[in-house]
Image: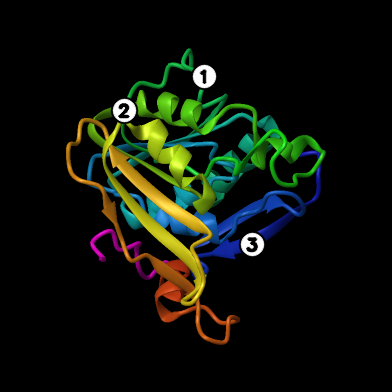
């Protein structure tokens, strides 16, 4: 059991019920955008690195009943909550939660038809983060290069690695993918139409030689800067996916 206060919440217009920490890192827009960016082909086996309370895994499971999902979470308390959430949503036959470090190459999980992650946005000395046990969700003790190198090794040929990160980290992400993954696609996420992107979804494939693609992306909020745009609202409600075909 978790040694901290939790809340019970619903996601995707009530289709998912989860328990999560009341404070610290919680399921947010980034989680749902990432889930909406993942391919779910029939028969695929997918892995989330740093799966938290399992919200993204559950979002994929309700989208396609013919995929198998593995979530790797190193915080034992959070992994325990994740297993409860999987059971609450009747997905124990579809989703496996592994307690461990997804970047630990000795963790024998095999290879996957897709890997995805919402990694910590900062490394030591960057940004602000809580000084408690949930610090790991905000600050990584390894570089972007190490994240991508390790997760690329978990992919089968042609499979995609998909990340959501701060837009400022895009140069480091592209550099880390060089020589490891190809066919890189970047989907910017802007707070509103007139602003610069603050987030990017990045997808790349093992063995691909396809050219780089910069997509139009998504504006989260309308001109009022308060309400979600229709496109963002549809994704957050689970009625639409990230459009990787947009230009």
**Which residue bears the numbered disc 3?**
9
Task: Write the residue at 36% across / 28% down.
Answer: 152
Where residue 168 sits in the image (x, y, percent)?
53, 50
* 3 or 2: tag closer to the N-terminus: 3
In the rendered view, tell whether residue 106 sits above or below residue 142.
Answer: above
* Residue 146 covered by magenta stretch: no
- Report if residue 1 is visible in the image: no
Label 3 and label 2: CA atoms lie apart by 38 Å
Dividing the picture into quarters, in which one does residue 210 lie?
top left
Q: Residue at x 59, y 27 (%)?
A: 142
Q: Report which residue position mark 2 lands on.
A: 180
Q: Residues within 10 Å of mark 1 (few under 14, many from 20)?
A: few
| Residue 179: x %, y % from top left | 29, 27
Q: Residue at x 39, y 39 (%)?
A: 174
Provide the residue span drawn in magenta.
238-247
Q: Is disc 3 placed on a helix, strand or loop? A: strand
Residue that label 1 marks:
104
Secondary structure of the residue carrying numbered label 2: loop
């Amino acid at each position: 059991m978790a040694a901290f206060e939790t809340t019970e919440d619903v996601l995707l217009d009530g289709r998912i019920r989860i328990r999560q920490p009341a404070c610290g890192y919680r399921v947010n827009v980034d989680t749902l955008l990432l889930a909406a960016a993942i391919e779910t082909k029939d028969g695929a086996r997918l892995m989330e690195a740093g799966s938290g309370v399992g919200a993204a895994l559950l979002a994929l499971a309700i989208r396609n009943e013919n995929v198998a999902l593995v979530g790797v979470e190193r915080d034992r308390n959070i992994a325990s909550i994740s297993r409860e959430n999987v059971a609450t949503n009747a997905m124990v036959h579809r989703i496996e939660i592994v307690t461990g470090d997804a970047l630990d190459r000795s963790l024998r999980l095999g290879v996957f038809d897709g890997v995805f992650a919402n990694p910590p946005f900062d490394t030591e000395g960057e940004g602000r983060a809580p000084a408690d046990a949930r610090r790991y969700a905000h600050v990584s003790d390894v570089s972007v290069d190490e994240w991508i190198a390790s997760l690329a090794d978990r992919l089968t040929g042609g499979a995609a690695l998909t990340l959501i990160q701060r837009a400022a980290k895009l140069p480091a992400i592209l550099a880390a993918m060089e020589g490891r993954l190809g066919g890189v696609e970047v989907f910017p996420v802007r707070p509103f139409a007139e602003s610069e992107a603050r987030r990017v979804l990045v997808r790349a494939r093992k063995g691909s030689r396809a050219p780089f693609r910069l997509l139009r992306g998504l504006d989260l909020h309308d001109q009022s800067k308060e309400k979600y745009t229709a496109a963002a609202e549809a994704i957050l409600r689970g009625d639409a996916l990230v459009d990787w075909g947009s230009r």
